[in-house]
């Protein structure tokens, strides 16, 4: 292997300045504004976020998941509760997420506790998923566990497809559902020239995340 030198991959960050006066009072209102910008820009999958959890062993682990909803109470995503991240969150219900909107020279970081969504919330979202995704949720019952080969996965999918033919209602697996990341800290990062980036962090200092008191600090780049 003759690796290239990653240090040579330098790009100037030409971004619009971000000032305290530009920010909404609530971090999720500010997130909504930036998320709308990311969608309008044509960015591929602006709802992709890197989710970091802590394993029961104490080792951190990160992966990309898709944001499926948000409001002032937090960010929602769905998964298999028996998956590696599901087990980690059951043991240590806190997480951090990053939205890496590189083409916009922006990123958003959110950290806080994590709670399971209700059965009603899970059922409502599951019904909106395409048929193939609903079947896939059943076929991936052993998510994150070793399998002998692709043929086993395809066989499971075919079995469930035969169990629920086209047009029949597919129930939600009991082990599948959503989590809400309830924000306690939210940082908005705007890239600027000469690495003099603009960074503002919201910290919850009183009350709950929806109507509580948030302090906003500018951070050194």
Image (cartoon, rainbow, N blue to C red):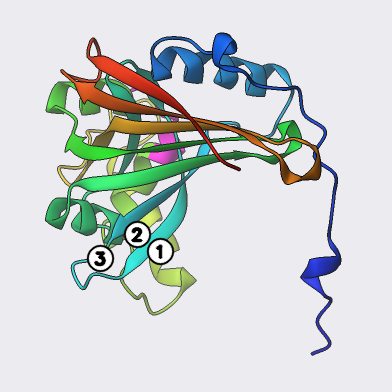
SS class, disc 2: helix
Mark 1 is surrounded, within 10 Å at the Cα level, by few (under 14), some (14 to 19) or many (20 or more) other residues, namely: some
Q: Give the quarter of the image for residue 38.
A: top right
Q: Name the residue nearer the viewer: 148 or 189.
A: 189
SS class, disc 3: loop
Q: Name the residue nearer the viewer: 103 or 124.
A: 103
Residue bounds of the magenta highlight: 127-133
Queried whether the magenta region covers residue 131, the answer comes back as yes
Q: Give the quarter of the image for residue 204.
A: top left
The residue drawn where x is 84% and y is 87% is: 2
Image position of 104 with respect to 161: above or below: above
Label 1 to label 3: alpha-carbon separation: 26 Å
Q: Are marks 2 and 3 in contact (CB under 8 Å)?
A: no
- What label does residue 209 carry, if any? none
Residue 126 position, x and y percent, is: 31, 29
Question: Which quadrant does the C terminus fall into?
Answer: top right
Instruction: Identify the residue under disc 3.
Output: 55
Q: Name the residue nearer the viewer: 82 or 213.
A: 213
Q: Are marks 2 and 1 in contact (CB under 8 Å)?
A: yes
Q: Is residue 159 visible?
A: no
Q: Is residue 205 visible?
A: yes
Instruction: Identify the residue under disc 1.
Output: 153
SS class, disc 1: helix
Instruction: Identify the residue under disc 2.
Output: 156
In the drawing, does residue 147 fall left or right of residue 66?
left
């Amino acid at each position: 292997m003759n690796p290239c030198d990653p240090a040579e991959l330098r790009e100037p960050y030409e971004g619009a300045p971000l000032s305290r006066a530009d920010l909404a009072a609530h971090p999720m209102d500010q997130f909504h504004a930036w998320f709308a910008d990311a969608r309008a820009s044509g960015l591929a999958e602006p709802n992709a976020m890197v989710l970091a959890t802590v394993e029961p062993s104490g080792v951190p682990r990160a992966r990309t998941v898709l944001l499926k909803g948000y409001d002032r109470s937090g960010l929602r995503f769905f998964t298999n509760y028996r998956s590696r991240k599901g087990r980690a969150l059951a043991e240590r219900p806190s997480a951090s997420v990053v939205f890496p909107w590189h083409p916009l020279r922006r990123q958003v970081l959110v950290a806080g506790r994590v709670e399971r969504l209700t059965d009603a919330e899970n059922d409502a979202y599951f019904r909106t998923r395409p048929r193939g995704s609903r079947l896939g949720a059943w076929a991936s019952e052993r998510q994150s566990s070793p399998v002998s080969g692709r043929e086993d996965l395809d066989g499971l999918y075919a079995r469930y497809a035969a169990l629920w033919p086209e047009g029949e209602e597919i129930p939600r697996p009991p082990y599948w559902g959503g989590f809400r990341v309830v924000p306690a800290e939210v940082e908005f990062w705007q890239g600027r020239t000469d690495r003099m980036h603009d960074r503002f962090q919201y910290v919850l200092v009183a009350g709950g995340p929806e109507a509580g008191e948030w302090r906003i600090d500018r951070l050194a780049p």
